[in-house]
Amino acid sequence: MTFTPPATPVLLHVCCAPCSGAIIEALCSQGVRPTVFWSNSNILSADENVRRLAVLRPFAARFGVEVIEDEYDHADWLTFVRDQLEAEESHVRGRLGRQTPDLAGYPERGARCEMCFRYRLLRAARYAAANGFGCLTTSLASSRWKSLEQVDAAGSWAVARANAEAAGAGDHAAATVSWWPQNWRKGGLQERRSAIIREENFYNQTFCGCEFSLNHNPSGTCPATADTTESTNTKTI
Ligand code: SF4
């Protein structure tokens, strides 16, 4: 894959090793050594969070890539996603229609997932602004199980909010962060992603991360490895 390297340090939000391996490899091969930001409070338990992070660490270390571990707080993620959904949906229905959303009632690639992306990318964007990274991207959309449009919308929303917060606080040292909406499935990366998963024998994740995704496995195979066999997902490719 080829791309124009950003003229600023890159913060790469990473959701898991299977989704990020080919991205880290591609960036480093073109002289861009990102810093990885692990922020995945969507994962339903601290044990599962640690287990997924432990798969990433040795892979990133081989490329000399630093991994920053964000605080894990699943309760805070639940509150944020519920509040965001309530605000978005009451805006559509009007104030009289305000009601607490049932997070289990949304399908994957539905509105709950976009709010989930907002949470993780906002934390990444705030870290980027506070630590001199002018560019933020993510591995979230490297899987066909995710919506590129939702990830891009959430990324743009996150950097706009983080930049506004920094400006509002009068933080003149904060970087202005740009969202890098690179399609990390193109240029052979989809194929390389699958190859790395096989070569590295990465931990076989059987669900996306949150408790609402536990029983959502439509292909009957692992979401991390299903990309090697699934061919009919027209919505997200
Ligand atoms: S299914 Fe995945 S992307 Fe959607 S809310 Fe759950 S953890 Fe987030």
Image (cartoon, grey):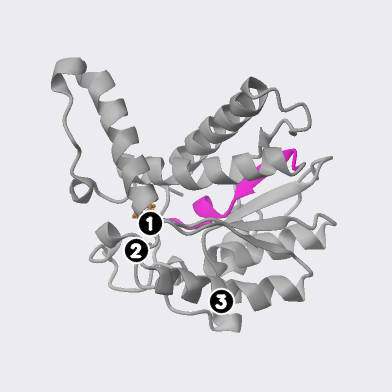
Residue 223: give x, y in percent of width and height.
39, 67
Task: Say if mark 1 contacts mark 2, CB within 8 Å.
Answer: yes
Looking at marks 1 and 2 on the same chain, the residue that comes earlier in the sequence is marked by 2
Does residue 213 appear to the left or right of 61 in the view shown?
Answer: left
Residue for point 52% across, 59% down: 15
Asked which secondary structure carries label 1, the reply is helix
Pointer 1 residue: 74
- In magenta stretch: residue 138: yes
Q: Is residue 33 above or below residue 61?
A: above
Distance between the Cα atoms at labels 3 and 1?
18 Å
In terms of depth relative to the viewer, which is nearer, 71 or 25?
A: 71
Residue at 54 percent of width and 35 percent of height: 158
Sequence-wise first label, 3 or 1: 3
**Residue 68 figure quarter:** bottom right
Relative to 102, 148 lies left or right = right
Q: Earlier in the sequence, mark 3 or mark 2?
A: 2
Residue 54 is tagged as 3
Mark 3 belongs to which amino acid?
Answer: Ala
The answer to whether one can see residue 234 in this image is: no
- Location of the N terminus by quadrant is bottom right
Between disc 1 and disc 2, the foreground one is 1
- How far apart are labels 1 and 2 at the CA level? 7 Å
The amino acid marked with disc number 1 is: His
Which amino acid type is shown beneath numbered disc 2? Answer: Leu
| Residue drawn at 45 percent across, 72 percent down | 225
Residue under label 2:
44
Identify the residue shown where x is 37% and y is 41%. 80
Q: Residues within 10 Å of mark 2 (few under 14, many from 20)?
A: many
Neighbours of disc 3 within 10 Å: few (<14), some (14-19), many (20+) = some
